[in-house]
Image (spheres, rainbow, N blue to C red):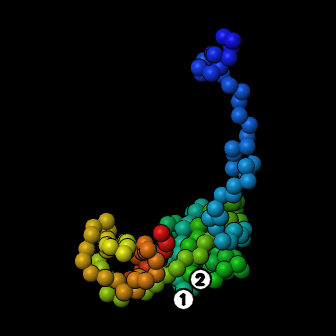
Amino acid sequence: MHERLAREGGLVEREPRGPWQEVGIHGMQRPREWDSTQTVEAPGIDGDAVRFVVLPDSSVLIEEGPDSDLAPLAEAVERDLQPPYRAQAARVRDDLWAVQARRIDVVKIRNAPDGDSIELTRDALVVDGQPVFGSVPELEGRGDVVRAERLDGDLWEIQVSRL
């Protein structure tokens, strides 16, 4: 009886739980982060890592990394998906690179408010974290919450959430 009371009172360690709570064992998948994963020979790229965006017109915006010609990386991605997309690549060894990319939505916002980020909800417009008056017609009616990040000039990457 004293063993049962000690166990119920939390004074005795319980049997260790099995690994079924780990991802991959209990049946729940992680959400897919990338739409394309490729390896490619890409000579002439400086550095060891790069992050970039390919716009709808196939122009490349380098966000992080060397200012090299990334055409071999973009061509590898475009075997699976068409622009626009966001990608990151890392040197595996020598001229062998691994590149991952995911689709993005890009819109052109004319007369956008000054700033680099916009969040539009049914009740508010927030630019760079500050509430503002006005509207952004290109974002209205897309969803309950629309977030936009400036890519270049009047091109914005958007993410739409429905509540």
Q: Which mark is residue 86?
A: none
Q: Are marks 1 and 2 in contact (CB under 8 Å)?
A: yes
Query: What secondary structure is marked by label 2?
Result: loop
Q: Is residue 40 left or right of residue 122?
A: right
Residue 31: quarter of image: bottom right
Q: Is residue 149 above or below residue 140?
A: above
Residue 29: quarter of image: bottom right
Q: Nearer the viewer, residue 158 or 7?
A: 7
Q: Nearer the viewer, residue 68 or 56?
A: 56
Q: Nearer the viewer, residue 94 or 16?
A: 16
Amino acid type indicated by mark 2: Pro
Q: Residue at x 66, y 80 (%)?
A: 81
Q: Identify residue for label 1.
A: 57
Q: Nearer the viewer, residue 154 or 133?
A: 133
Residue 163 location (% of width, % of height): 48, 69
Amino acid type indicated by mark 1: Asp
Residue 77 location (% of width, % of height): 67, 76
Looking at the image, tell me whether mark 1 or mark 2 is earlier in sequence order. Answer: 1
Q: Is residue 84 left or right of residue 122?
A: right
Residue 162 location (% of width, % of height): 49, 72
Q: Identify residue for label 2.
A: 83
Q: Is residue 46 above or below residue 153?
A: above
Image quadrant containing the N terminus = top right
> How many marks can you see?
2
Residue 10: quarter of image: top right
Is the residue marked by circle 1 packed among few (<14), some (14-19), or many (20+) residues within 10 Å? few
Whole-number angstrom distance, CA of label 1 to CA of label 2: 8 Å
Residue 32 location (% of width, % of height): 65, 64
